Image (tube, rainbow, N blue to C red):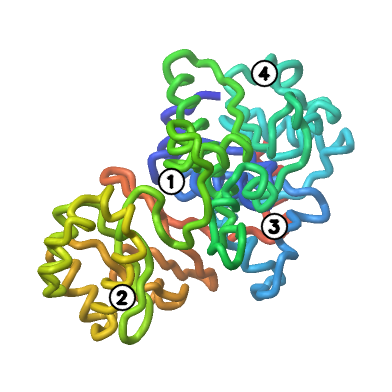
Amino acid sequence: MPNTPERSANGRGALAGLRVIDLSRVLAGPLCTQMLADHGADVIKVEPPSGDETRTLGPPFNDDGDAAYFTAVNRGKRGIALNLAVPQGRETLMRLLEEADVLVENFIPGTMQRWGLDFEDELKPRFPGLIYCSISGFGADGPLGSLPGYDAVLQAMCGLMSINGEPSSGPTRMGIPIVDHLTGYTALTGILLALHHRDRTGLGQRVEATLFDSALSLLVPHAANWMHSDQVPGLLGSAHPNIAPYDKFHCQDGLVFLGIVNDRQFAKFCAVMELPALASDPRFAVNAARLEHRDALRQQIEAALSGWKRETLCSALMHVGVPVGPVHTVPEAFAQAHASHRAMSVSSDGYRGIGVPVRLSRTPGRPGRPPPRLDQHAQELLGEAP
């Protein structure tokens, strides 16, 4: 149902007054709905009686016995447990949907239909303003339709592993579930687009996001390179297929990543490093030449960096506009003064998590309540339901 002024006035944030029913679990769906909650939406997390399996994916666990993984993507929500496989659970869900604007689910396609909760046949006629977001591995149709999908499997199937890693290690899974993350953001974008359309028409619609589509969309510039050259992209370690020097390098006390993307930055780098011969060498004069001679360039850069400490090097280069940064551990990353300045680590009521990555000047988002315990808000929610 569209927001009313009364509902919108009851919360804070750009999405205040929006009510979201979150049937999703694990990562992509819960991340999407957590971002909605961070910006003011009232998100109701509906779990099966056994709970979201992510609660068990530890250690580490919090004081309530839930895995840290679960807490990373479920803050700001109220929780209720329902068995949607039985009529009573479905009837309660229908009551919750009476006041809902958005439903998000990531079941294997066909599951909602088996429960009599199909969007087109059951939900849309009853709730014409409902935005129904379906997240899945491959979608409901096509050669792979309705099959289960997981982040690492999609990294393998969609070519991401083939471009990640060193030649000595072979294709390697990226260290974060990047396909799940992007799918969560893709779903969020689709929901916001559908809400904008509903503001003009009053009508809801189905939003679909798949891990398969998201994974393929990540292949920039690798897919474009292949489409224009017929050359199969390969393993470059931390290097870039189109830019040099754009790679990690050793200096005196650790690794740094040097990200030079144009000839002007390369000239500044050579000036700071006092390497006039490198700047005038025709092998390195322009990016295309540097790519062709990347191995020789690497040798000269690492020789020059060997006498520099990370902090001194990064400060000298960054202050003249040459992008470079130390290769940090996770604790080192959050210990940076700028991470504190940007409020990218939050701690409240025993909860610790990552901050809100998008900033709005008029309606800033903020982390909400700690992640719910299983079925924590059942009585509260049932008391509110029509």
User: Where 6 sits versus 255, above or below?
Assistant: above
Q: Say whether marks 1 and 3 touch (CB < 8 Å).
A: no
Q: Quadrant of residue 130?
A: top right
Q: Which residue is mark 4?
A: 124
Determine whether the residue tagged by mark 1 lies in a helix, strand or loop. Answer: loop
Q: Say whether marks 1 and 4 touch (CB < 8 Å).
A: no
Sequence-wise first label, 4 or 3: 4
Q: Quadrant of residue 14?
A: top left
Residue at the spot 87% in from the left edge and 38% down from the top edge: 85
Q: Nearer the viewer, mark 2 or mark 3?
A: 2
Look at label 3 and name its amino acid. Gln
Q: Position of residue 327 (x, y in %)?
A: 39, 72
Q: Say whether marks 1 and 2 touch (CB < 8 Å).
A: no
Q: What is the number of the mark on residue 376?
A: 3
Q: CA distance from mark 1 to mark 3?
A: 22 Å
Q: Which residue is mark 2?
A: 302
Residue at the spot 71% in from the left edge and 17% down from the top edge: 120
Q: Position of residue 240 (x, y in %)?
A: 39, 54
- The C terminus is located in which quarter? top right
Q: Position of residue 10 (x, y in %)?
A: 45, 41
Sequence-wise first label, 4 or 2: 4
Q: Which residue is mark 1?
A: 39
Q: CA distance from mark 4 to mark 3?
A: 29 Å
Q: Residues within 10 Å of mark 1 (few under 14, many from 20)?
A: many
Look at label 4 and name its amino acid. Lys
